[in-house]
Image (cartoon, helix red, strand yellow):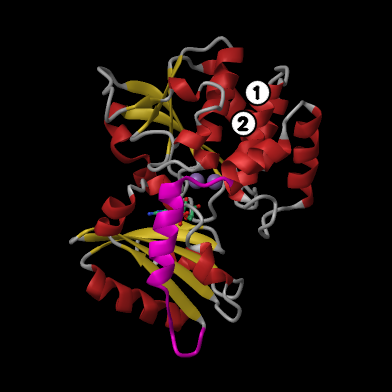
Amino acid sequence: MQTYEQSLEQAKQFLLEHDDFLVVSHIQPDGDAVSSTVAVGWLLSCLGKKFTLINEGSIPERMQFLLMSDQIVNMEQNPLERTFQHVICVDCADFGRVGLTERYFDNNAEILNIDHHPTNNGYGSVTLIKPDAAATAEILYDLINISNVTWNQEIATAIYTGLLTDTGGFRYSNTSPKVMAIASKLLDYGVNGPELSEQLLESMTHAQMKVLTKALRSLQMTDDGKISWVCITPQDMIDTGAANEDLEGIVNYPRNIQGVEVGILFKVINDQAVKVSMRSAGKVDVAALAQSFGGGGHVRAAGCKIEGAMETIVPEVIERVRSFL
Ligand code: AMP
Ligand code: MN
Ligand code: MN
């Protein structure tokens, strides 16, 4: 078993020894996914390397201020014409999370897997996985520090964004002393903390508020008050004009109710599939729960996609949660 420091060194060698990389994160990217993608891009540019940044879909509007975020290719709009031998996956708990971007990987591609999900199964030829890191951005902070490059305000802002969003504004239990120490350094590099909190966590579009209202109207709870959930249907998305990124944070509402152990958001994709987001108050390991449905995540925040109709999936998930209580 190699140490974290050895893994960092190995990842650094992967960057130094190769060139012409494809950098990818998970579908429907969150703050950590976008931050990690651009941070790797920035590091590669400092090292004088060629690279392409890509995601299966678009980058949420509120993150489009991040450096190099305009360079992340949206493959739905701009499919690539070639494949890559060297791929860097960031914040992807399992290989499937890269979505359709997989088609740009050479058949025998060498993959560097940088992630912080405890459910990461170690895919790839080089792995840099730290399950107790609050965000993949925390790992990239360390990688940047051993790479002899000079920090500036823009890259510091990207790393801060990953930390801020994955810790829910430095509030969740993953907010370790190390996270606070890194945040302090990043503020020294010129990061505007309050402005980022406002933009990434506080401010809402009208569509976001409308879809939150719909979700709260659907709120349900088990008789014992330990499981609570909300549902969002395709019709809700049409009625409110909301995008998937507008659903971020809604799952916290059922979880925040006193006495609730597991809060769930069921996002109906269509008649055949539902995306399930789960949050734990602390007792239930929702990563294990999500994994039992083929998904993954963290002990207190996890997700999965389940094939089937909402009418059958909701009771099935609630029953499974009960068995974990
Ligand atoms: P979400 O509920 O989508 O905010 O995701 C919560 C956590 O679970 C994040 O860390 C995700 O990376 C992880 N996660 C969500 N969906 C999946 C999935 N289908 N497979 C593996 N991990 C997931
Ligand atoms: Mn993520
Ligand atoms: Mn993350």
Q: Looking at the rendering, which quadrant does residue 295 occupy?
A: bottom left
User: Does residue 5 show up magenta in the picture?
Assistant: no
Q: Is mark 2 within 8 Å of ligand 3?
A: no
User: Does residue 215 show up magenta in the picture?
Assistant: yes
Q: Amino acid at mark 1?
A: Glu
Q: Amino acid at mark 2?
A: Ala
Q: Position of residue 137 (x, y in %)?
A: 61, 38
Q: Which mark is on residue 193? A: none
Q: Looking at the rendering, which quadrant does residue 181 occupy?
A: top right
The vertical placement of 9 against 203, above or below, is above
Q: Which residues are magenta?
A: 203-225
Q: Position of residue 237 (x, y in %)?
A: 31, 53
**In the foreground, 288 or 169:** 169
The vertical placement of 174 against 1, above or below, is below
Q: Which residue, given by chain and number where applicable, does mark 1 sit on? A: 154
Q: CA distance from mark 2 to mark 1?
A: 6 Å
Q: Label 1 near label 2: C-beta < 8 Å?
A: yes
At 45% across and 22% down in the image, what residue appears?
70
Q: Position of residue 102 (x, y in %)?
A: 31, 34
At 67% across and 55% down in the image, what residue appears?
174
Q: Position of residue 132 (x, y in %)?
A: 65, 52
* Residue at the far bottom in the pictured view: 223
Q: As drawn, is 298 to the left or to the right of 74? A: right
Does residue 94 appear in the picture of this structure? no
The vertical placement of 303 against 32, above or below, is below
Q: Which residue, given by chain and number where applicable, does mark 2 sit on? A: 158
At 18% across and 61% down in the image, what residue appears?
271
Instruction: Check disc 2 and report its element: helix, strand or loop.
Output: helix
